[in-house]
Image: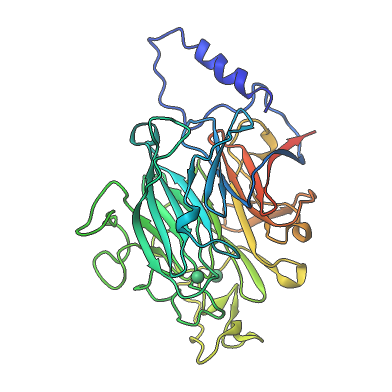
Amino acid sequence: MRLLLSVVLGLSACGGNTDVVDAAPVRLPGCETPIAGGTLSLRMVGRVDDAAMLVASPPLDPRRFVVEQSGAIRIFEDDALLPAPFLDVSHQIVAGGERGLLGLAFHPQYATTGQFFIFYTTSTANVVARCTVSADRNVANPACTTVLSIPDFAGNHNGGMMEFGKDGFLYIGTGDGGGGGDPQRTAQDPNRLLGKILRIDVDGRDMGKEYASPPTNPYVAGGGAPEVFILGLRNPWRWSFDKDTGDLWIGDVGQGQVEELTVLRAGEQLGKNLGWSIYEGASCCMTQGDRCSQTGNQAACNPTGLVMPQDKHSHAEGWISIIAGEVYRGTCYTDMVGWHFYTDYASQNAGLWKARLEADNSLEVVHTGLSLPNGTASIHADSRGELFLTTLSNHIYHIEAGP
Ligand SMILES: [Ca+2]
Ligand SMILES: [Ca+2]
C-alpha cells in the first residue's frame, strides 16, 4: 500500500509519449513491485463509526468508499478517513439486524455520469436508489431517486449486494423475504422479485419505470418478472463477479444446516436456478431432518435443472452465514491471483478460505490458515483489485500476502 501513490503518480509522469494511446486500463495499478508468497495477513487500514458493511470504489478511482449499516457512506483517500460522509441516508432507512444500508455500486461510467446506486431497507421494502455526486467529488447530492422498491414482509433475508456486470447492467441480490423456511415460497416464484438475482439496465427506461429490463433476461417475453435473472436463492448476502472472467461467485446463506458457494461461469448464468427452497445445499427439504424449517407442504425434490453448490460448509463446522468474497485480480500479490477469498459471518470459527474453479466446474478449496476477527460482513475489491475485509465491529482490513 505504501507504494500505491508513487505508482499512480509515476504512471502519470510516464505519459510523455502522447502518440501512444492504450486501451483504457481495467483497473489502477496496485504495487510497484509485486510480492510473491502464500502467507496471508490482515492489515487494519481504517475504521468507521458504525458497522463497516462493504468497500467499493468507482472505476479507476483510488478512493475507497465504505458503507456503514446505519446509512452513511464514508470515503478513505490515501488511507485517511475524510471527516464528512459522502452520503447519509440514515433518516430514510431502517437499520439493525440484517437491515440497513447494505449495498453500493458505482455506474461503470461514473466519471462522466456521476451516478451510483445504493441498496437499503425500510420497514416494508428493499429499495434500490440512484444517487449522484455533487460538484464536490467527495460529497453526493442528498436526494436520491428510487429505482426499484421491492415489498418485503420480514426483517431478515434482505439480500443487498449489487454489482455492475461486464455487460453494463446492474445486478441486484434479494433475499427470499425472510422469516424461516421461505414461508411465501418466493425463491422459486419467477413472478416475485424476492429470492433472486435481478438484472436491470439503469440507462434505459421501460414505460413507467426508472430502468429497463434487458431484452435478454429470461422472463421478458413472459412467464415471470422481467427483472429476474437467477432464481432459487435464500439470502445471497454477498456475491461478486470475477472481474477478469465474468464468472459469478454466489454465497447463499443457509437455513439451519448448509452454507453454499456456487460459481456460474460467464455465459452460463442467465435463468439459472440455485434450488432454494426445494433444496438446502444438496439436501431435499422434504426429507432433510428439519425440512428446511418449512411449514406446510414442501416442494417435491427433483434436481433436474437446478444448480447445486460446488462448495458447502455445515453449521456443525461452526459456519452460520457464508460471506462470499471476490476473486483477487490485483497486481500486488502474485500468489493470490485467481483465487476467490471467502469466509463466514462467524469468521472466528471459519477463518479465511480460498477457492478456484477447475476445468470440470468443480472447486479447488483451501483453508488458508489465516485467522479472522469475528463478524465479517464482506470481502470486496477496490479499483486496484485489492481485497478489503470489513467487519460489523467497524474495521476495514486489507488482505495481504508475503513469503
Ligand atoms: Ca426481508
Ligand atoms: Ca442452493
- On the image, the x and y values in percent for residue 229 come to 38, 62
- On the image, the x and y values in percent for residue 361 come to 56, 57
Check the image and name the residue furthest to the left.
207
Q: Going by the image, does 289 lie left or right of 137? A: right
Q: For this rendering, which residue is in front, 167 or 163?
A: 163
Residue at 64 percent of width and 44 percent of height: 48
Image quarter hosting the N terminus: top right
> Is residue 107 positioned above or below 291 on the image?
above
In this rendering, the count of numbered labels is 0
> Is residue 13 positioned above or below 160 on the image?
above
Image quarter hosting the C terminus: top right
Q: For this rendering, which residue is in front, 402 or 151?
A: 151
Residue at 39 percent of width and 32 percent of height: 111
Residue at 63 percent of width and 41 percent of height: 387
- On the image, the x and y values in percent for residue 117 come to 41, 48
Residue 265 visible to an observer of this rendering: no
Q: Going by the image, does 273 lie left or right of 147? A: right
Quadrant of picture, ligand 2: bottom right
Q: For this rendering, which residue is in front, 66 or 203?
A: 66
Check the image and name the residue furthest to the bottom.
296
Q: For this rendering, which residue is in front, 112 or 3?
A: 112
- On the image, the x and y values in percent for residue 216 come to 29, 57
Q: Going by the image, does 215 lie left or right of 232? A: left
Check the image and name the residue furthest to the front.
91
> Is residue 51 positioned above or below 400 on the image?
below
Colouring convention used in this rendered image of the protein: rainbow
Q: Going by the image, does 333 lie left or right of 153? A: right
